[in-house]
Amino acid sequence: MTRKQKRLLVRIAAALIVFVAGLFLKEWWRAGCMIAAWIIVGYDVLWAAIRNILRGQLFDEKFLMALATICALAMQDWAEAAAVMLFFQVGELFESLAVERSRRSITGLMNIRPDTATVLKDGEEIVTEPEEVKLGDLLLVRAGERIPTDGVIVEGEASLDTAKVTGEAMPVDVSAGMRVVSGSVNLNGVLTIRAESAYEQSTVARILTLVETAAEKKAQTERIITKFARFYTPAVIGAALLLALIPPLVFHQPFAEWIRRALTFLVISCPCALVISVPLSFFSGMGAAAKHGIVVKGGVALEQLARTKTLVFDKTGTLTEGSFSVQSVHCTSGTEQELLRIAALCEQYSNHPVAQAISSACPDPKGEARNIREQAGYGITAEIDGKTAAVGNARLLASLGIAPEESGEVGTHVYVACDGRYLGMISVADSLREGAKETLSALREQGIERFIMLTGDNERSAKYYAEQSGVTEYHAQLLPQDKVGFFEDILSGKKKAEAVAFVGDGVNDAPVLTVADVGIAMGGVGSEAAVEAADAVLLKDDLTKLPTLLRIAKKKTAIAKQNIAFALIVKGICLILGALGYAPMWLAIFADVGVAVLTILNAFRTHKN
């Protein structure tokens, strides 16, 4: 609770004591206590109303509360004036606490920013600002400190708290050679880290930028409510004036009674339940997503997600891990270990992703490769154990007069031969991301009807990954510009009330993320361009977060609609009763503050996701 909220709570308690004491007194003593309670709890409302009048801002809830309670005092309804102001301030406190709670859910991410960075230079420790860290700097991170920028551990072991960065609740054990992200907290041990990026390009800086701009994008429902309130308030002020003047002037009714009805009508009409609760529903949805390691850039993304019926995926790095690994080894002569050893010795100096995958499968091959020759588009030949080895594609072996065995497996096929004799084949391919198939099944249960995969892979590979993941439709051999064209065709064929979302991770996905109704980026390995273009970012490359995001979006939208319907129905009934004289000021305050409090509490339910 903030200092301002504590002060308001104290004032409410003091005014309530004076109010209750006044109930046991008589005549002017009671009036004095009620007026004192009214001033104690409501002086800031009165001052805000006066200040707004001087600025030309007449039509807000503070103006209505001040006008209603002053008129109640003028008609010597002392207890009603004090009680109305008390009830209003209790509602204001609830509203303030609600907004603060939602804000903490999102701005809790702001605490991931490291305060300082310790740079090691020439054996000295230099404490500096995180913004001063440069690519390649050696950083010292002790227990309890935050990692200032993304990097690779050079020395040390520790457990990291990555909860606020990735949403992962369990500590992560790290050691030399492992990559770490900025914003993580070192729980124990001492780490020496080589910076892989400057602070401005680090994970934590990108997250903070997303959070700071998240509230700028209003959902369509929120924009409608804002416009509605702008025209609605002057309209009800005019209606209240007509209600106060026409019956006395035209039908010779008593002025006091119709002024009371008009004031009651004004208090009932205040649209704060709509103006507060609908944006709060979106804001609390963003907070709930943040707790799961998902940054949503505004309510519009959540609202569109709730209407999504079609999900389009990039393949590499999204449905798959985005890194090659050895899937299988087929030998026609010798053992699998020997085949991998020969291939690894030839590939150990190559930077090609396929070569690195083979080297990872056999990290410490015994022996030495000499006279290594790499032919672009073919492969590598070298001398190993006094024999001429060849590792590459079918064209390389054909050039040596060797016919490899064909395989129907998906992936890149690396053939191995030695002294003109075919030894076997290594299949290297991308791996399906863990939980991808289960994620699509969960999304299907939540109402997603169509899953589409867009990829630059060949037809056979695309078909394989589509079947493995549960994607029902795919388009293969697409260039980045082709993906945009396909996606625009998908958008043109959708129903008006539906939305289409795209999930991607790379630079080439940025154009599609931009044109999609909802663009979702994989923020862990995703490119800066993709993260910038997206409407929502999965901070940890975890597809299993998608059903959670969709569930939050659907619940948030339902709550916003519930709040709108409830507020309009209650206000409509109370406005009619107020105009007919059957609604006392107590009911008017319930229709305003009471409905606002109930809709705010309803909006809170989004946090339970």
Image (spheres, rainbow, N blue to C red):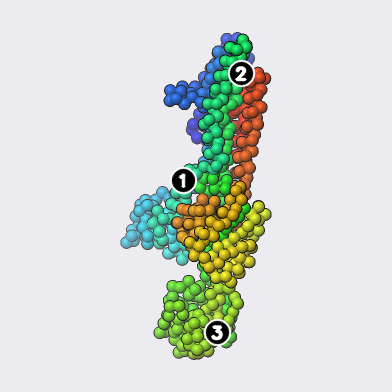
Q: Which mark is residue 404?
A: 3
- Circle 2 or circle 1, nearest the eye: 2
How far, Cα to Cα, is label 3 from label 1? 56 Å
Q: How crowded is mark 3: few (under 14 residues within 10 Å), some or many (20 or more)?
A: some
Q: Residues within 10 Å of mark 2 (few under 14, many from 20)?
A: many
Q: Quadrant of residue 240?
A: top right
Secondary structure, mark 1, is: helix
- Amino acid carrying label 2: it is Arg
| Residue that badge 2 annotates | 261
Q: Quadrant of residue 277?
A: top right
| Residue 152 versus residue 19 in the image, above or below | below
**Image position, residue 534 (x, y; %):** 50, 53
The reply to whether discs 3 and 1 touch (Cβ–Cβ < 8 Å) is no
Secondary structure, mark 3, is: loop
**Image position, residue 209 (x, y; %):** 44, 49
Q: Residue at point 57% right, 70% down?
A: 459
Q: Residue at point 43% right, 80% down?
A: 375
- Amino acid carrying label 1: it is Thr
How far, Cα to Cα, is label 2 from label 1? 45 Å
- Amino acid carrying label 3: it is Pro
Q: Is residue 513 visible?
A: yes
How far, Cα to Cα, is label 3 from label 2? 94 Å
Q: Residue at point 52% right, 65% down?
A: 478
Q: First in sequence, mark 3 or 1: give its number.
A: 1
- Circle 3 or circle 1, nearest the eye: 3
Q: First in sequence, mark 2 or 1: give its number.
A: 1
| Residue 362 versus residue 125 in the image, above or below | below
**Image position, residue 429 (x, y; %):** 55, 71
Q: Residue 129 carries which label?
A: none
Q: First in sequence, mark 3 or 2: give its number.
A: 2
- Viewer-closest of 487 and 324: 487
| Residue that badge 1 annotates | 213
